[in-house]
């Protein structure tokens, strides 16, 4: 039986959706009207820390102003959030991840059955962001990054591969180039930007969206093409499922889409992975599900 949430109307998205694990068919969605989105109570959003500026300065406050609900956001490494959700340390209505692996970690009875589906909606390439006042700027612009980050005195930062998908991608980049893990210092997702801007790091691994968002200059990784894959789901047993659904609708309204573009996310056609019949019916048209 499909899940119904009273008071939340079905809406549609601008982005195309398709299925992955079920035979249910899909249809082209349309953009929901932000003015039609209402919610009440506290809506708790657990999101990948790389989206902090987007969530806390634009989408979160705008959603609250539009819907009438109280927005409460928590940003951290996606893998760390999975552990906190499973351990019941963090409670949330919506989970926004930077890796599909994080979603897999919440699916199935062995993982607590916290989610049955997720929608993929955007990407952001992994890059090296650097402090423009670093004494190594000239080297970063003229030499292979693989050489520069191993130079004496160079301070390179990364998030923890065990807690954050970005750290896992960074470790993959190092392995691909035959570089030791000791080439980087590991910090929590929430500290990376601050440490770089304070001059405690010369450079670090960042997603292109967060670097552009914060005016952090970058260099690309050359032939290495790694990226964040952003997903969203309404968690099972959400304290405020109706509010969570309203938030997902706002995320894909015209204002929500414009905010995501403004903050450098590369939007892609939405794909739904998991059990489509477990997607709340109010999101059917929003995700292009027939």
Image (tube, rainbow, N blue to C red):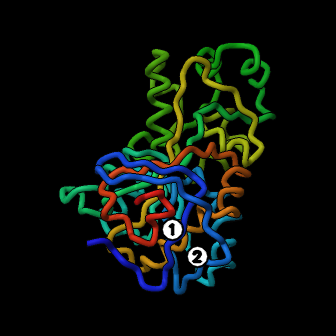
Q: Name the residue under label 1.
A: 45
- Tell which of 281 and 114 is nearer to you: 281
- Tell which of 253 and 260 is nearer to you: 253
Quadrant hosting residue 268: top right
Q: Is residue 280 left or right of residue 77?
A: left
Q: How crowded is mark 1: few (under 14 residues within 10 Å), some or many (20 or more)?
A: many
Q: Residues within 10 Å of mark 2 (few under 14, many from 20)?
A: many
Q: Do the numbered discs 1 and 2 sit on residues whose CB atoms are within 8 Å?
A: yes
Residue at image position (42%, 66%) is 234
Residue 189 percent location from the top left of the image: 54, 49
The first of marks 1 and 2 along the sequence is 1
Residue at image position (36%, 68%) is 89
Residue 102 percent location from the top left of the image: 38, 49
Above or below, 9 against 191 in this view is below
Above or below, 13 against 160 in this view is below
Residue at image position (60%, 23%) is 221
Q: Name the residue under label 2.
A: 71
Q: Is residue 29 left or right of residue 87?
A: right
Residue 97 in view here: no
In which quadrant is the N terminus drawn? bottom left
Q: Distance between the residues labelled 1 and 2?
A: 8 Å
Residue 261 percent location from the top left of the image: 70, 50
Residue at image position (48%, 72%) is 244
Q: Is residue 273 left or right of residue 230?
A: left
Q: What element carries label 2?
A: strand
């Amino acid at each position: 039986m499909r899940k119904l949430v009273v008071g939340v109307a079905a809406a549609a998205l601008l982005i195309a959706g398709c299925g992955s694990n079920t035979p249910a068919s899909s249809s082209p969605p349309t953009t929901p009207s932000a003015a039609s989105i209402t919610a009440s109570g506290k809506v708790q959003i657990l999101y990948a820390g790389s989206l902090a500026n987007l969530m806390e300065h634009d989408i979160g406050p705008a959603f609250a102003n539009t819907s009438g609900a109280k927005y409460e956001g928590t940003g951290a490494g996606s893998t760390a959030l999975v552990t906190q959700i499973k351990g019941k340390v963090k409670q949330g209505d919506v989970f926004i991840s930077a890796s599909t692996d994080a979603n897999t970690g919440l699916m199935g009875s062995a993982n607590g059955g916290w989610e049955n589906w997720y929608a993929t909606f955007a990407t952001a390439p992994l890059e090296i962001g650097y402090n423009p006042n670093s004494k190594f700027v000239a080297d970063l612009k003229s030499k292979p990054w693989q050489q520069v980050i191993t130079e004496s005195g160079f301070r390179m930062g990364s998030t923890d591969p065990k807690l954050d998908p970005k750290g896992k991608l960074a470790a993959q980049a190092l392995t691909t180039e035959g570089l030791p893990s000791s080439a980087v210092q590991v910090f929590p997702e929430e500290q990376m930007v601050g440490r770089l801007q304070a001059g405690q790091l010369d450079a670090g691994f960042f997603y292109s969206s967060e670097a552009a968002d914060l005016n952090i200059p970058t260099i690309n990784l050359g032939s290495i093409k790694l990226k964040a894959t952003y997903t969203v789901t309404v968690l099972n047993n959400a304290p405020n499922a109706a509010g969570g659904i309203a938030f997902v609708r706002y995320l894909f309204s015209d204002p929500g889409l414009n905010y995501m573009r403004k903050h450098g996310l590369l939007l892609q056609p939405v794909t739904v992975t998991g059990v489509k019949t477990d997607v709340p019916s109010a999101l059917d048209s929003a995700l292009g599900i027939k």
